[in-house]
Image: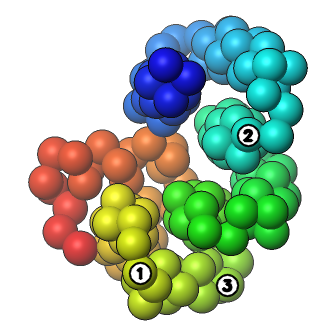
């Protein structure tokens, strides 16, 4: 149940767009904060905190949260994939180290697909100014080939 709820929040943070983004993100942040009270040690909630920061354009804050998640849960490569995106959006060249780590590791095919899409987007400088969800949207619509 908690996993499904977190999936819904992730989709809402990543893909939903509205005229009033600040209000929308605030509502989601309130829900995530309540979940933190119920499950304070759940790294997935910290990852949702990072997604909220990304939605607000706070790439530095997202990198800080995701780096802490990686330090506490090194096998949670989804956080590494999101960290690669945040580093890329900041113009930090270390994003490629995260991509290489994920692509050369075992497991999580979803994270590998995510960073492959990020690599493909990196070939287009105009992407750097787009929203975090744009890359995933292009990948989902098969308009972006890794």
User: How far apart in space, not on screen, are marks 3 and 1 (Cα)?
Assistant: 21 Å
Residue at 67% across, 84% down: 94
Label 2: how many residues lie within 10 Å, few (<14), some (14-19) or many (20+)?
Answer: few
Residue wearing tag 1: 106
- Residue 113 spot, x, y in % from top left: 31, 66
Residue 28, by quadrant, is: top right
Dot 2: what SS? loop
Task: Using the image, determine if residue 26 lies above or below residue 103.
Answer: above
Label pair 3/1, CB-CB below 8 angstroms: no
In front of the other: 79 or 132 = 79
Residue wearing tag 2: 42
Dot 3: what SS? loop
In front of the other: 142 or 110 = 110
Label 3: how many residues lie within 10 Å, few (<14), some (14-19) or many (20+)?
Answer: few
In front of the other: label 2 or label 3? 2
Task: Using the image, determine if residue 68 lies above or below residue 24.
Answer: below
Residue at 81% across, 53% down: 65
Task: Using the image, determine if residue 114 lies above or below residue 54.
Answer: below
Q: In this rendering, does residue 60 appear at all?
A: no
Q: Is residue 106 left or right of residue 44?
A: left
Q: Residue furthest left?
A: 142
Q: Residue 94 shows which numbered tag?
A: 3
**Total residue callouts:** 3
Label pair 1/2, CB-CB below 8 angstroms: no
Q: Which of marks 3 and 1 is nearer the N terminus?
A: 3
Q: Earlier in the sequence, mark 1 or mark 2?
A: 2
Dot 1: what SS? loop
User: How far apart in space, not on screen, are marks 1 and 2 (Cα)?
Assistant: 23 Å
Give the quarter of the figure containing the C terminus: bottom left
In front of the other: 88 or 47 = 47
């Amino acid at each position: 149940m908690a996993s499904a709820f977190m999936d819904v929040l992730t989709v809402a943070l990543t893909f939903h767009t509205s005229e009033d983004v600040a209000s929308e993100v605030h509502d989601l942040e309130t829900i995530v904060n309540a979940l933190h009270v119920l499950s304070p040690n759940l790294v997935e909630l910290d990852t949702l905190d990072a997604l909220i920061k990304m939605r607000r354009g706070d790439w530095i804050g997202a990198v800080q949260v995701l780096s802490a998640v990686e330090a506490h849960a090194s096998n949670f490569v989804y956080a590494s994939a999101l960290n690669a995106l945040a580093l890329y959006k900041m113009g930090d060249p270390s994003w490629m180290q995260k991509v290489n780590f994920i692509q050369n590791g075992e497991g999580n095919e979803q994270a590998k697909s995510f960073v492959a899409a990020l690599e493909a987007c990196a070939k287009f400088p105009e992407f750097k100014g787009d929203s975090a969800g744009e890359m995933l949207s292009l990948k989902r619509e098969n308009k972006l080939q890794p």
